[in-house]
Image (spheres, helix red, strand yellow):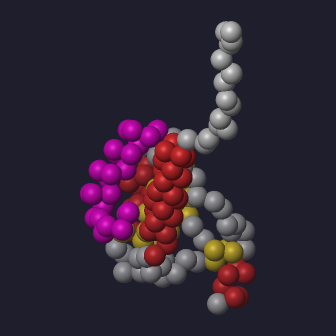
Amino acid sequence: MKFGHVQQEQPESIPMAPLIDIVFLTLVFFMVTSVYSTLESEIDITLPTASTAELSERMQGEIFINLREDGQIVLNGHEVNLKGLQEILDRVAHHFPGGSVIIRGDSKAELGRAIAILNACRIADIQNISFAALPEAFEEAL
């Protein structure tokens, strides 16, 4: 008489459903971030150059405000006036304190419009403000 059952070992398999889910979510994440990162650089702005300019990576929570040559302010692909910009900056400063603003102004844009943007940032209590510029090597390459 045999009292014990002999179990036949089956090879362990990798669960495919969770693996497919992870790969799909990773793909969606990279697609969304690549579209978002190119959104601001598609605007036709000729950035000024500076000898001390450095190329930097985009950080989370940065707001890019684009100032065109004609003085139009563009935020997230939408043209806004100063009042609309102020409302947006107020909401951003309220929900994300300590956020930063990068002003990408055309080299031929009026200084007065850039000062108006700086004033809107100050009213919204955003302290981390910088201007985008390209290193002089980029100008020589063009």
Q: Quadrant of residue 7?
A: top right
- Image position of 39 (left or right of 90): right
Q: Is residue 86 magenta?
A: yes
Q: Quadrant of residue 84?
A: bottom left
Q: What is the magenta range?
A: 75-97
- Residue at point 66%, 62% (across, down): 56
- Residue at point 68%, 21% (across, down): 6
- Residue at point 33%, 51% (across, down): 88
The N terminus sits in image quarter: top right
Most common SS among magenta residues? helix
Res 112 seen here: no
Q: Is residue 80 magenta?
A: yes
Could you tell me residue 86's position as x and y percent?
Answer: 32, 53
Could you tell me residue 47's position as x and y percent?
Answer: 55, 77
- Image position of 80 (left or right of 26): left
Could you tell me residue 61's position as x and y percent?
Answer: 50, 49
